[in-house]
Amino acid sequence: MEKTKIINALAALAQESRLAVFRALVQAGPAGLAAGKISELTGIAPSSLSFHLKELLHANLVDSRSAGRFIIYTAQFSTMNQLLAYLTENCCAGSACTDSTACSPEELQR
């Protein structure tokens, strides 16, 4: 993932409402949520929600599709996974991390 896209994604998530929307969509899974349900779950007014969804769409963190009268939003899991991979690719000073041992700064100083 190129740095410009990483910076755009991090910038989009560095805002309380957008982070709440993204987390709600991640929890909803591939089925996604209609805008009204996102508004209900996050407490974000519909007029503000459309702005935040546009920013997340621009950062390629969410996708949208029509379903009858509704627009369903879903998290872009591929972008999320690429972002997480970029942030953790040099974890543990380049050593492979295992599920049983998490990286910790104390371990790296030894």
Image (spheres, rainbow, N blue to C red):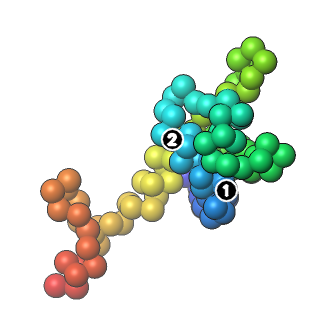
From this view, report whether residue 42 is shown above or below residue 38.
Answer: below
Q: Is residue 94 above or below residue 98?
A: below
- The quarter in which the C terminus is drawn is bottom left
Say what secondary structure mark 2 lies in: helix
In the rendered image, which quarter is residue 5 located in? bottom right
Estimate the spatial distance between the alpha carbons at disc 1 and disc 2, rounded to whole Å. 14 Å
Residue 65 in sight: yes
Judged from this view, the residue extending furthest toward the top is 68
**Residue 91 location (% of width, % of height):** 33, 66
Q: Which residue is mark 1?
A: 17
Which residue, as the protein is rendered here, is positioned at the far right? 47
Question: In terms of image quadrants, where is residue 13?
Answer: bottom right
What residue is disc 2 on? 26
* 52 sits left or right of 61 in the view: right
Foreground: disc 1 or disc 2: 1
Q: Residues within 10 Å of mark 2 (few under 14, many from 20)?
A: some
Q: Residue 55, how many percent across, how many down?
A: 74, 51
Where's residue 4, x and y in %? Answer: 66, 60
Say which amino acid is labelled 1: Ser
What residue is rendered at 78% in x and 18% in y? 69
Residue 60: image tag: none
Residue at figure coordinates x 49%, y 33% from the top left: 29
